[in-house]
Image: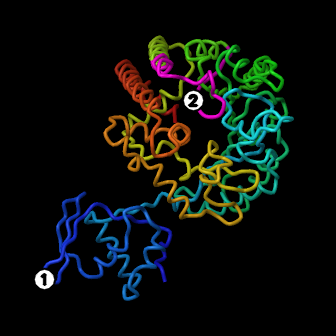
Amino acid sequence: MPPKQWNLAYKALDHNLFCKHNKTYGFAVSTGEVCELPQKHNAVLSAIPSIFTLLEDIVADLPHTIEENELAEILRDLKETGFIDSFDEHIHPISSINLFLSTFCNLNCVYCYGGEGRASDLAGGSYGMKQELMSLEMGKKAVDYLLKTSVLRSDHSSGGINFFGGEPLLNMEVLRGVCEYAEEQSYKFGLQPPSYSITTNGLLIDEAFISLCKKHHISVQVSFDGTPEAQNTMRPKSGGQPSYPELEQALQLLKKHHLPIRIRATISTKNIALMDSIEHLESIGVDQVHYAIAIGQDTGLYALDEKDVDMLTDAFEKVAEYTIERIKTAKRFVRCNNLFAMMGQLQKKNIKKYACGAGIGLASLSPEGEFHVCHRFAGMTDFSFGHIDNGIDFRRRLQLIELMNIKSHKECATCWAKNICGGECHYSNYDTTGHIEIPNHQMCKFHQSLARTTIYMSSEIRQFDEEMYFKCIEQGR
């Protein structure tokens, strides 16, 4: 019978064993520990591969003479002396779920990574999945999963739900139904409801949606590329019509109701001059923006080359100078979350073992109930790890998470910024190199420059006003 912690995983670290006079001696490279290994310790160590393996599978290869309590003590000894390491991230329940309310959209974005599989009579993409709307039943299953696993989270929270797509507002009734069901069930469990957010292109924002956001405290992020020209070129409506006029009305509606306006802008060759977008966003009352670089499906002529990345480096430096100047003159400014999030990370000296929480705390749920590592990998069976009806496939999840761990990225080993970056976006790596553990070198260069820019900005703000520095970090969380 396996130990109660059956879903823990272990791997053997670098070591050397040798026998002398019928005894086994060992040297653990990571700690320098030298010792005699008793027979049962040697048997356990020999059964543990050099890649993380579920304890359930390790136990299957052990002699039956090793009892459960004895095994727990041996594992503890081997870990403390540096012969093995444990890996617990994969046992944590998913705490945040992206719900694909819709796999199609009302825009035809040029760079859409979901464009493959696009039906001729429907705008948007399918992400390799069938073009469909998520059912309310499936949304309720996601809520049930979050509430039932709340007891396993350290804060016993109900987790979070991000309504995603395609365009999630094409499925407004299920959005509303999920929120209402989540709140009803949460009270039965004696819990606070999950936190809600939505990522939308904004064209369907109306008074009814605003009311729903206020009622259920839904945080809104709008995809907008920063300037009318970039928006109309890169994010046209079906048929090629400009999308900015309707988007502008939606942003003004959010502003009218005093809802924070958070923007996600995709960078292409049409909007590398970030200060142009910052100035426009400031003029329409936007609070904050996060920039992401276009990769994947249909980037075509709009994808960044080496020269463009150099220009983007300069562009972020200008945004940093703008931020410093506005703070020093006590003027309103648009917060660039790329810089502020990294600023907080540097201040807390956080070491990033992963580029993000994909597969660990975060997963995406397709309309058919498949768990995927993140929204970028939706519809890709190689990056799924379970079904909402059957639960998580721990072995598959473990394999994916280990590949995403920075320690698996051999090319990152000597990079000075590896603990800031975490190994680059897994999808960006896969899209460029075919492997999630091999980095996109163009993005490596960019993230190193972004780190240097952030270090400079942090230092300038802290020297000017330390209280403001910590306030910026707090607001950036």
Q: Is residue 292 left or right of residue 220?
A: left
Mark-to-mark CA distance, 2 and 1: 62 Å
Vertical comparison of 434 with 441: above or below? below
Query: Of residues 91 and 110, which is closer to you in this image?
Result: 110
Report x, y in % for residue 474. Answer: 49, 33
Find out whether the residues at labels 2 and 1 contact each other: C-beta distance under 8 Å: no
Q: Is residue 297 magenta?
A: yes
Residue 320, position as x, y percentages in the image: 46, 18
N-terminal-most mark, 2 or 1: 1
Residue at numbered disc 2: 292
In the rendered structure, the answer to whether residue 311 lies left or right of residue 387 reads left
Q: Which residues are magenta?
A: 284-313
Which residue sits furthest bottom?
A: 65
Front-lying residue, 291 or 221 = 291
- Please give left or right for residue 14 compared with residue 436 in the image: left
Mark 2: which amino acid? Ala
Q: What residue sits 55% from the left and 14% below the top?
A: 273
The image quarter in which residue 83 lies:
bottom left
Count residues near mark 1 (Cα–Cα under 10 Å), then give few for <14, some for 14-19, many for 20+: few
- Quick one: SS at disc 1? loop
